[in-house]
Structures are given as structure tokens and as C-alpha cells.
């Protein structure tokens, strides 16, 4: 088999230019679709199908449905004109079968005049327009069929045309016929050389179709049943490999799994009692779940999901304190230095009456200061360490890490999280995210994490009132800004760009900040915050804003994650059409954090359906889970789960909505396989290992939800 596999590899790697009919021009077009080899072609799955397999009688043709039928030409081709130039023409021909008559029409295809001859038989497939007294088929595909044929479905020629046809994703200049032919040729080429990556024992157990059958039938299904079977098998394979890949990454990081046993202690209860507010039931419940994990003797692996503003920070702090009172260090990693600084302030403040030392480590620290803090961390003189990616650098050594937390987990990759946990000996692990992740995606990304949900907001929060507006409202909105500031509140204005761009017509923070500081709001204190500023500058600005020294903070989406300034009650988003739904929700989450009524204004200049749809969702809903769900639906799983966003291999066929059940199954199988053969060294798993290595060739480092 070894040699055969090598041969199969060879064939699969043939460049598509080795196929008939693919020269330089078409090769280039295929490359645009990411298709370079025969392997790419057979993995270029149809986006849809046309069912040309069922032959319908003319009398049974239904309005607005695409249908296939055989008709005998009953008239010459008539040419009609429409519009007011002589170039716009309609070609019309009458056809019939034993049950009735229909007109077949095409637009602007003058050459058809000489194609059809009376009494010839044709196969047609096209969309039907049916009214009381007429049946019309518009722009059908057609093919002449032999005289002898009397609707005999075994007829060879008919079998070729009257079948379920794939419709491929394509690019302009590349017709469906060209793609179909290329795929078909590739399939012929690899016939007998496609080895099944799923071991027989798995296929058998889960009643999955064989690989080559599935590949063939996903492109050219013999019938609908075969298509279903093929699709299921391929979707399973995709989800299974993805899961197996993620699990095997995990395995290389965590081999031994004995957890540190922490005791109950008293400090956390004391802290809970001394807080200026009462924890919500949801916060208490989640902290309880965390405590149980940490006392259990197993390594905690928990994901905490809670909408923006639900109060995740305090839950993190309690968990950190629990580690500290048991004599361990606790580490909190966040995606931006602004957020690290903010957490540092909050936490230091919360723990000021406790004998707990809090430190911060970000990329901004240099020289002596950095050396000093690194030493303190190593010696165990700092108990709680807050920081950015700097926390996982090689140079950082910890004394004894008992708990690692990543906040805003969606900004981190799987590997970063694992690297952080490697800094200790099987420390407990907590990941927090404000971006509500659809359940299915959480399953994929976090595999066997336990999930806790903070599904309750602190009391007294009012729904952020949200309005979608356009430029004509600017005067009124400006007055509203002025009014808010005069009442002592603060305002964010978020722009999509940092600086003006020649290519993109959207507001930039730099220009807008300059403009309003000179004109509309020259009497107010305007600040500017964006990603290109030096870290120290960013921190200074955020600090001023938090202290109320800035009235209006013009910013980019850098303020998207985590920032907590309860006195800010107005969020203005310029060119809101340029942000995704989940991002808009995150941005809006920067206000509505205090007791005052807060507002969010979305400037939308786009008329696109999707933009308007997004604004509608935002205006209507304040619930992050609902919004994430809508986001997923509006963007479609392809884009939402695309490689770019997550660093995960792209799902080509599985659909996380429809295939949630399949995903669970795939996940169970993957777990079983890894338990049985952690390094995939067994003979029967050889091909599996190879597929995974291929799938994850793009760096696993980048796996994240960003
Ligand atoms: P997020 O979940 O978005 O990280 P934060 O932890 O930043 O939310 O909390 C948002 C705000 O709510 C903070 O100002 C915090 O002090 C406050 N907060 C948290 N828990 C409660 C509570 N139980 N009651 C009242 N306010 C709370
Ligand atoms: Mg937070």
C-alpha cells in the first residue's frame, strides 16, 4: 500500500495545467480560486446543485421552479424586440410533448435562430414562468438528443445530461462547464488512487460512506440519496480532522494531568463581603464552579462567557485571590496594554487592604524596571501578575503559578493559552470571553473545556438606547453630545480608520479629532486614542479619560475590548457599516456600565441590505448571544468561521449550524482516537496523521477568533 500511496500523492499533486483544456489563461483563473493541483480540484466542492435528473412533463411544469424536460421543436425561432434599440432581442421557440405546449425563450442570442429545427427533440433545463394560459421557460440550457430516444431513461446520452449537476463557486471568466469538465477529468485521473483517510474501524462504526464514493458523489451525485451520504461523510471527516488536530496540539502541551489541590480558605469570602456591591447570583454561581474545580484535584479547564459588562473581572480577581491564599501565584493575561493597565489599577485598588502584591508586565517595560519585575516574579515576591503577551516570553520565569487566566480569550490563540499554562506545573486554567461564542464554535475552539455562563447583569443597568442615523442628523447629535458633557458625562467617538486613506471613504480618528477640537467642540476637552500611538501615550490618554479629564475621546476600535469607564454614557460610531455586528456590540458595551441612561449612535451611510440589517439588529437587541447568532447568520458560517478570522483551517463543507450533531459525534470519535493513540503512531492512523499535518500546516499559533 505504501507505494500506491506515493503514486496517489503524485497524481493528486499534478498541476491543473496537465488537464485537457486548461491553458495559461484558465490556469490563472483557477489560481484565483486557490486551485493549483488535481487535489485542489477534487476538493473544490459545489456550492449548490441543479437537479436535472427528474424529467417533468410539460403539463406538470411549475411556476418559478427550475425543471428539466424533453420537448419537440414545434415552430421556427421567432425574433422579438424589446427596449428601444434594435440590439435587444428575444429568441422564442415553441416546443411540445404529448401533454402540452410551452415557449422557450432566450435574451439576445441571435445565433439561436439557426439552431433549432422543427421536429427535433431537445433536453431543456431552466426556470419556468407559468401563468393561466402560457408556460414559458427562460434561458434554459438545451441539448439535442437522438431521434431514437423515446424518453428512455437508460439512454446513455440522456444519463449524461439529465442528472444532478454541481454548481461551483467561481470567478468571472470561468464557466461552470469548464470547472465541471476539469473536475470530472480529475476524478477520472485519480480513480483507484484515492485512499480513505478514515480508518475502516471508524467508518464501520459510524456508518460512513467510503471516501472515493463520497468524493465522486459530492461532485456528480448519482441521486439525492448518494449526495446526502457523501456530504455527511465528508462533513464528518472535516470536523473530525479539525477536532483531532486541536486535540493533538493539546496533547503535546499537556501530558500529565494532576491538578493542584487548593483549599477553601477565607480570604475570598472576606473580599466578597467587602465589595462595594453585591455579587449577582450568576457571578456567585460561576465563582462556585471555579472554586469546586480548583479544589477537585483535577486541572481546571474552564471557559467563562459573559456579555460585556456582566462583571467578569471581579470573578477573575476572586479566583486569583484563591490561588494566592493557597500560596500560589496567579497570572492574568489580556490582549492590550491599555486593558492590562486598567486591570492593574482596578485590582490593586480592590486588594489595597490585603497583603497581596500585584504587578504588571507589558511590552512597554524596559531596562532596569523590567529586570526588577522579572526577578520579583521569579522569586515569588509578586502574587498576582497582570500583563500582555509579554507574560509568555521565554525570559519570564514564575515562582509557582497555580492559576492562569486569559481575559478576552477570543483575542488569543490556542497556542498562546497553552504556552501560558506551561509556565507552571499544570496550573488551573480559566479563560474569559465577552464575545459570546456560538456554542458550536466554542466546542470546536475549546474542545473539552467546561463552560460557565454569567447570564445576568448587575442590577440597575439600563438598556443602552441605540439609534441608527445618517449625516443629516449630525447637527442634532452634536447638540446631544454637548448636552451629555454639560451634565458631566463623557463621550466616545469611534472611527473605522486611524488616518485618512485615499482608498477608503470613511472617517478617520486623527482628522475627526482635529476637526471637532477646532470647530464644533472647541470649548470641550477632546482626546485621541489609536493603535499607532506609543504605549505610554495610550496609557496616559486612557488614564485621563478614566479620571474624567477628557470629555470626548475620539478613538479607533482599540477601545473595543474591556475598557471600563462607567461615567462614559454616549458612544458614537462613525461609519458603523464598516464594523461587524459582534464588534459593534463590543463597542457599545463601553457604555451603559454605570447607573446613568446610556446611548449609542450608529452613523450609517450605506444603503446595502446587510448594513441596514445590522443596524436593525443593534437597535433592537442588547443581548450579545442574540447578536452573535445574527452575526453568524448574516455573514454566513463561511465568513464567520473563515481562516482569516480564526486561523483555523477553513471548513469547506461542514456547516456548524446544520451539523452540530455531527460535530458532537466527530468530537467523541476524535477523543477516543487520541486516548487510544495519543501520537497517532499506529498503522491504521497513518493517513489521519498525514491529513492533520496538512490541514494545520498554516501555523497553529495563529488559531484564534480574531
Ligand atoms: P466585563 O464582564 O465586561 O469584563 P467588568 O468586569 O468590567 O465587565 O464589569 C463592568 C462594571 O460592572 C464594572 O464597573 C464593575 O465594577 C461593575 N460590577 C461588576 N459586578 C457588579 C455587581 N455585582 N454589581 C454592580 N456592579 C458590578
Ligand atoms: Mg472585561
Image (spheres, rainbow, N blue to C red):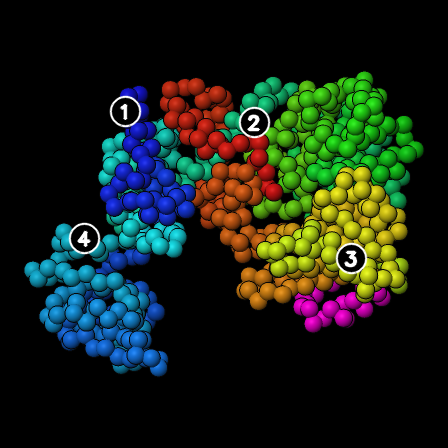
Evaluate if marks 1 and 4 touch, with contact meaning CB atoms under 8 Å apart: no
| Mark linked to residue 420 | none
Q: Secondary structure at mark 2?
A: helix
Query: How dense is the environment of label 2, judged by Cα within 10 Å: few (below 14), some, or many (20 and up)?
Result: some
Q: Secondary structure at mark 3?
A: helix
| Mark linked to residue 4 | 1
Query: What residue is shown with label 2?
Result: 250
Query: How dense is the environment of label 1, judged by Cα within 10 Å: few (below 14), some, or many (20 and up)?
Result: few
> Which span of residues is magenta-colored?
463-484
Magenta segment: does it hold 15?
no
Single out the mark in the foreground, 4 or 3.
Answer: 3
First of labels 2, 4 by sequence position: 4
Evaluate if marks 3 and 2 touch, with contact meaning CB atoms under 8 Å apart: no
What is the CA distance from the residue labelled 4 to the residue labelled 3? 69 Å
Single out the mark in the foreground, 3 or 2.
Answer: 3
Q: Position of residue 192 (x, y in %)?
A: 24, 32
First of labels 3, 2 by sequence position: 2
Residue lying furthest left in this view?
A: 148
What is the CA distance from the residue labelled 2 to the residue labelled 4? 49 Å
Amino acid at each position: 500500500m505504501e507505494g500506491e500511496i506515493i503514486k496517489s500523492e503524485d497524481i493528486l499533486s499534478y498541476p491543473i495545467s496537465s488537464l485537457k483544456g486548461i491553458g495559461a489563461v484558465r490556469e490563472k483563473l483557477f489560481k484565483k480560486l486557490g486551485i493549483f493541483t488535481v487535489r485542489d480540484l477534487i476538493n473544490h466542492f459545489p456550492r449548490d446543485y441543479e437537479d436535472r435528473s427528474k424529467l417533468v412533463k410539460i403539463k406538470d411544469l411549475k411556476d418559478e421552479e427550475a425543471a428539466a424536460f424533453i420537448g419537440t421543436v414545434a415552430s421556427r425561432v421567432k425574433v422579438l424586440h424589446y427596449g428601444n434599440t434594435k440590439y435587444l432581442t428575444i429568441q422564442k421557440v415553441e416546443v411540445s410533448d404529448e401533454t402540452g405546449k410551452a415557449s422557450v425563450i432566450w435574451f439576445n442570442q441571435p445565433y439561436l435562430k439557426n439552431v433549432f429545427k422543427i421536429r427535433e427533440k431537445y433536453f431543456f433545463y431552466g426556470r419556468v414562468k407559468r401563468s393561466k394560459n402560457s408556460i414559458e421557460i427562460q434561458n434554459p440550457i438545451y441539448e439535442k438528443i437522438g431521434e431514437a430516444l423515446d424518453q428512455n431513461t437508460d439512454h446513455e446520452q440522456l444519463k449524461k445530461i439529465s442528472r444532478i449537476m454541481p454548481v461551483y463557486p467561481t470567478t468571472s471568466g470561468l464557466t461552470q462547464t469548464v470547472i465541471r469538465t476539469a473536475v470530472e477529468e480529475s476524478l477520472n485521473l485519480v480513480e483507484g488512487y484515492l485512499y480513505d483517510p478514515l480508518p475502516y474501524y471508524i467508518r464501520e462504526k459510524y456508518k460512513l460512506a467510503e471516501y472515493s464514493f463520497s468524493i465522486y458523489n459530492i461532485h456528480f451525485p448519482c441521486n439525492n440519496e448518494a449526495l446526502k451520504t457523501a456530504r455527511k461523510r465528508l462533513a464528518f471527516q472535516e470536523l473530525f480532522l479539525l477536532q483531532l488536530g486541536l486535540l493533538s496540539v493539546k496533547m503535546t502541551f499537556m501530558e500529565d494531568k494532576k491538578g493542584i489541590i487548593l483549599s477553601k480558605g477565607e480570604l475570598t469570602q472576606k473580599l466578597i463581603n467587602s465589595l462595594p456591591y453585591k455579587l449577582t447570583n450568576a457571578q456567585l454561581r460561576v465563582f462556585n464552579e471555579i472554586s469546586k474545580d480548583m479544589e477537585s484535584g483535577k486541572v481546571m479547564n474552564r471557559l467563562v462567557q459573559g456579555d460585556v459588562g456582566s462583571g467578569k473581572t471581579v470573578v477573575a480577581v476572586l479566583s486569583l485571590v484563591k490561588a494566592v491564599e493557597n500560596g500560589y501565584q496567579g497570572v492574568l493575561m489580556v490582549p492590550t496594554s491599555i486593558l492590562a493597565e486598567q486591570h492593574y489599577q482596578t485590582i490593586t485598588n480592590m486588594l489595597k487592604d490585603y497583603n497581596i502584591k500585584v504587578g504588571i508586565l507589558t511590552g512597554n517595560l524596559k531596562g532596569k524596571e523590567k529586570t526588577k519585575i522579572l526577578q520579583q516574579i521569579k522569586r515569588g515576591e509578586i502574587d498576582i501578575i497582570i500583563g500582555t503577551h509579554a507574560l509568555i516570553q521565554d525570559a519570564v520565569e514564575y515562582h509557582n503559578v497555580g492559576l492562569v487566566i486569559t481575559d478576552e480569550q477570543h483575542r488569543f490563540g490556542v497556542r498562546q493559552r497553552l504556552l501560558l499554562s506551561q509556565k507552571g506545573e499544570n496550573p488551573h486554567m480559566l479563560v474569559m470571553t465577552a464575545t459570546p461564542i456560538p456554542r458550536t464554535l466554542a466546542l470546536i475552539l475549546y474542545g473539552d473545556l467546561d463552560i460557565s455562563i454569567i447570564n445576568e447583569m448587575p442590577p440597575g443597568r439600563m438598556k443602552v438606547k441605540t439609534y441608527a442615523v445618517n449625516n443629516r442628523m449630525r447637527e442634532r447629535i452634536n447638540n446631544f453630545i454637548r448636552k451629555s458633557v454639560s451634565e458631566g458625562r463623557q463621550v466616545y467617538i469611534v472611527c473605522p480608520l486611524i488616518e485618512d486613506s485615499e482608498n477608503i471613504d470613511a472617517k478617520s480618528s486623527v482628522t475627526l479629532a482635529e476637526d471637532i477640537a477646532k470647530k464644533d467642540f472647541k470649548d470641550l476637552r477632546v482626546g485621541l486614542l489609536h493603535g499607532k500611538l506609543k504605549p505610554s501615550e495610550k496609557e496616559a490618554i486612557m488614564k485621563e479619560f478614566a479620571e474624567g479629564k477628557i470629555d470626548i475621546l475620539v478613538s479607533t476600535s482599540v477601545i473595543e475590548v474591556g475598557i471600563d469607564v462607567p461615567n462614559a454614557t454616549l458612544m458614537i460610531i462613525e461609519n458603523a457599516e464598516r464594523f461587524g455586528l459582534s464588534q459593534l456590540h463590543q463597542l457599545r458595551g463601553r457604555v451603559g456600565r454605570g447607573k446613568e441612561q446610556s446611548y449609542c449612535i450608529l452613523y450609517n451611510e450605506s444603503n446595502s441590505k446587510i448594513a441596514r440589517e445590522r443596524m436593525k439588529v443593534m437597535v433592537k437587541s442588547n443581548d450579545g448571544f442574540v447578536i452573535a447568532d445574527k452575526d453568524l447568520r448574516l455573514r454566513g458560517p463561511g465568513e464567520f468561521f473563515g481562516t482569516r478570522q480564526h486561523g483555523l483551517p477553513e471548513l469547506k463543507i461542514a456547516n456548524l449550524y446544520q451539523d452540530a450533531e455531527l460535530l458532537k459525534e466527530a468530537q467523541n470519535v476524535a477523543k477516543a482516537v487520541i486516548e487510544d493513540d495519543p501520537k497517532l503512531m499506529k498503522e491504521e492512523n497513518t493517513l489521519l496523521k498525514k491529513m492533520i499535518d496538512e490541514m494545520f500546516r498554516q501555523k497553529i499559533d495563529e488559531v484564534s477568533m480574531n
